Amino acid sequence: MDILLSHISKTYDDNKNKRVVFRDMTAKFTSGLFCVIIGKSGVGKSSLLNLISGIDIPDKGIIQIGDAGVSDMTDTQRTIFRRKHIGFIYQFFNLIPVLTVLENVTLICELDGLSKKRYLDRANSFLKQVGLFDRRNDYPDTLSGGEQQRVAIVRSLVNDPDILLADEPTGNLDVKTGRAILEMISDLAKKNGKTLIMATHSLEAIDYADAVLSVVNQTLVPLSKEQIHP
Amino acid sequence: MNQHLLIKICFRQSRSHPLRTLLLIIGIAMGVAGVIAIDIAKTSVSKSFDLSTAAITSETTHQVVGSNFNIPQSVFTDLRTRLGIHRSAPVISTHITVMELKNATLTLMGIDPFSEMGLRNLTVRSRSGTTGKDLSGLLTHASGVLLSQAMASQYGLNQNDTITLSFGDRQVQTVISGFLDSRDGATNAIFQGLILADISLAQEILGMGDDITRIDLILTDAAMAEQIVKRLPDGVILVETRRQNRIVRELSRSFETSLTAFSMLALFMGIFLIYNTVSFSITQRRKLNGTLRALGATRKTLFWTVLAEVMIYALVGSASGILLGILLGKGAVHAVCSTVSDMYFVLTVSQTHITVPTLLKGFFAGIFSCFAASVFPAITAARTLPITLMQRSASESALKKYLPLFTLTGMVIIGAAVFMLNFFTRQPGVDFIGVFMIFFGSALLAPMVILLFVRGLLALFKKSWGSMTKMALRNITRSLSRTSVLIASLMVATSVYIGIDIMTSSFRCSVIDWVDSHIGGDIHVSSSDTLKRGLSPRLVADIQALPEVAGISVYNIHRIFSRTSGEVHIFSYITDLSTKKWSWTAADETQLTALLDQGWIFVSEIFAQRNRIEAKMGASVIIDTQTGPVSFRIAGIFRDFFMGGGRVIVNRKLMKQYWGYDDITSLQVFLHTPKTVAPVIERINAFVPESANVKVVSGATIKKGILDVFDKTFLITSALQILTAIVALTGILNSVMALLLERTRELGILRACGAETGQVGRLLLLECGFSGFISGVMALPLGGCLAWVLIDIVNRRSFGWTYDMVTSPKIFLGAVTLSSAAAIVAGIFPAVRAGRTDIGSALHME
Ligand SMILES: Nc1ncnc2c1ncn2[C@@H]1O[C@H](COP(=O)(O)OP(=O)(O)O)[C@@H](O)[C@H]1O
Ligand SMILES: [Mg+2]
């Protein structure tokens, strides 16, 4: 599914302080590719991902994912759409502390009302792939940061979404672990044919990416590899 | 770091969460208001009792009274002329109602102005304001009475206005000849319940002929007392005024004791709920405090900042609680006083009495519980390393570490309380300290019980429950330090609810049982004439002859004076078809009638308690009779719920011999089928000549009347129950809102993962429901225990009556449902808000 953003404007009202994040921004993410979005902290990378996933809605403009017009949906419709088509990975892992690894991973499927049979095998096989099958009954706070992020990766994949969104997935990890996670995400995305959009301020991800974009002057501009590695 | 700045930061935070701040203040205010309202009701009723009983016996040392409440006036003349006791005065004293005062009940006091001069100093002012006007001058008016000035102006009555006094069936019109008004406020308060008349006028109004109620005396030496006793005719007794007043006052103490019990319960509940509210709002500051510490705020400044902030809210909350409590209390006083007058004791004065100690009690309950709730978090805020403060899990792990200690302490406290309740119940006050200890101990057990409960449920339903349900349960144990406070306070509230419920329903069951068996009868026939109370034997025979009639209880009932318990009702049966519930018998129940015939007597529980009769073989009691004091052997003690000095049953022969009555005053008619009640009442009425003043009512009417009074009596307890529910609701709402705030991020994740608004809301409601359910279940044993204390200790000790504790699964089921429902209702608003969590900003905040 291609993702199409056309003429998007987004402003945050924060106690009378208006902050324009996007102004008449248009962009397209092609299905099956790995896109990296870079930019300084606070330019609007997270906001962009939130718009794509329907967590937030634009003030103006249209967001189209495949045939679905996300920006025109009701909140519930967007929620259900997100559940079915979008996987999310965060900087702070965002696992639910009171659920075990397995329960965290299968939560989305459960929310979707799927039967256990349909997702349990899938969840277990992903957990095996990331090497955490043995820890499936442990709680997240007993896991290291890297392990927690691996659980989050599995969670984002288990309901077989078309699109994977990753918001600084390595931002909270040391360099070595970060690289491993990066590799794992891009690897799994490619293998399963997912569109992957990753926001990051580390430049390492660029090596894995098919395309690189940057938020400049409230819009998204494509960068060539030369521009990044002068 | 400067303290001003810290306080400013804290208040900024409160200002940016006005709803939370408001809830905190409301929570404190509700707790304080509950304490104050019940306490006002209690002190006001005590004060009204005091004023109504105090009358103006002030200086007198002794009283001469009749064993059947009347003595001939000649006794007085005799004392004056033969013994030359000049400091003596004849008195008539009876309750009457006054139509013009909206049928208020007052004490009609008939006095002899000339005798009074040597005895009482009644300062009276006439309307025109001439103070110290002679009492005799005011009372010489042929049919004039004196009324309290305050009462008169309240009802717009003037001098020479006519008022109608009712006494039983009699109605007499009199003229107001002046007003009672003293410079002294206390005396004026007593005047409010009084109508003063010349003694001959009083005799006329009451149709007493030449009889008087009592003679008030001031005696200076014991020899004189002995001399008087020697001269008094049989059936006339000399008693000490102080002692007599004390006995009358004791009658009402029982009611006050039970009110004290409720005010204590309100206090406990208030403390628990305020603690809950405050501890929740203070832990919300954990992170802020951690940051401030990290930035260099010293321990001491932080400690004082936290405390100062909470204390400011405590002040505001307690102050508004006092206002609210006074409002509620005024309503409660009115309800309670009318109840008391109906059932226990005629209150001629009803006042809202707001005392400083009451207000202080409420105020300090608020301040103290706020302090207690904040001091621990304040210490931890100051003590802990900044980094651990920033993580909530630190306090949770601290709790887990102390869990065994908490549990053990809780058990020890409960054990000590149970020991105390079993062995030291004689001392008043001990029982409520015991109850508080049990509450406190159970609160300490709460974290462990919650932990086990949740683990048990999870283990039991591991397979069948979804992650959301498990999440709800595990969330409870995850913030155990918080949820256990919430659950414990909800538990206390629920158990108060259960305790009162069991007490009232048990009591009601026993009362119904008593009405049905002891009072019984389909139709009651009695004289409504307060003076000539005998029914004609002809009437009895006529009723007996009716084909619908299966049987009749035929008896007489009279009031007699008892030194030890005041007014006692004495019965003697010709035929007795009632069944009694015995709390003790000297012999097998089948033998009791035989014992009665041999001259033994039956007494009611209350009489037994007032006379300190021990329920064992050989028990006996001395009762004043017309022929002097006589000792009677007791064959049995029966359960009886009439208030007053109690009841005594003797055989016909004794009644005639010792009290001079062999009339028939009452009949209980039993029919073959209850269907014919109305036609039979009509036929009985037809037997009765118009002039005979015979009252014929159905048993159902009497039962309804008694149960109505009963239900009114428990108005105050129902009020307490409602209060419990309201206070509990505010408490939970507060805590859930606080928990919600802490969860914002987590709810954001859930929403981001694709949980719908409804699913998130349901999670929160589920959490509330589980918490409520756990509280409800934990409250069951606690509520049962409270009911036991109320029934077996408080009620028995204060009223002297026993009743069986009746518990039904319905009560327990109802309580669990109630606490779950309350928690869910309190969760609705937060749940809706949780559903609306703005995912973007929830995840944004880090
Ligand atoms: N929910 C929100 N409310 C108000 N302001 C927001 C919100 N989300 C983001 N912003 C603002 O929008 C800007 C972009 O934020 P964000 O997208 O998080 O940046 P990035 O992820 O690139 O660091 C920031 O200035 C931030 O303050
Ligand atoms: Mg960001």
Image: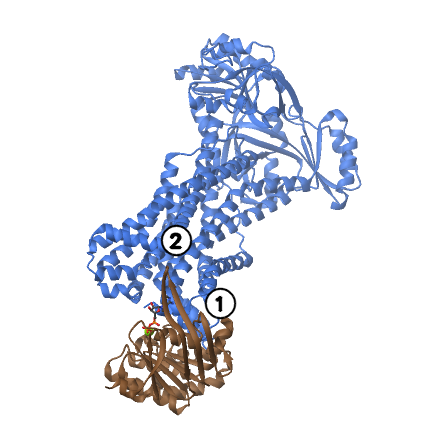
Chain colours: A brown, B blue
Discs 2 and 1 lie in a common subunit: yes
The residue carrying mark 1 is: B762
Mark count: 2
Is there a contact, CB below 8 Å, between mark 2 and mark 1?
no
Mark 1 vs ligand 1: CB below 8 Å: no
Left or right of residue B6: residue A114: right
Asked if one can make out residue A94 in the rendered structure from this viewpoint, the answer is: no
Please, is residue B577 above or below residue A82 in the view?
above
Quarter holding the N terminus of chain B is bottom left
The image position of residue A40, as x and y in percent, is 28, 75
Where on the picture, by quarter, is residue B175? top right
Under circle 1, the secondary element is helix
The three-letter code of the residue at mark 1 reads Arg
Whole-angstrom CA distance, mark 2 to mark 1, is: 26 Å
The image position of residue A220, as x and y in percent, is 36, 78
The three-letter code of the residue at mark 2 reads Pro
Give A176 or A145, whichever is nearer the viewer. Answer: A176
Which chain is disc 1 placed on?
B
Residue B18, disc: 2
Looking at the rendered image, the disc whose residue lies closer to the viewer, 2 or 1, is 2
Residue under the image location 38 percent in, 46 percent down: B317
Give the image quadrant in which the ligand numbered 2 is located.
Answer: bottom left
Asked if one can make out residue B489 in the rendered structure from this viewpoint, the answer is: yes
Under circle 2, the secondary element is helix
Left or right of residue B578: residue B81: left
Q: Earlier in the sequence, mark 2 or mark 1?
A: 2
The image position of residue B754, as x and y in percent, is 45, 75
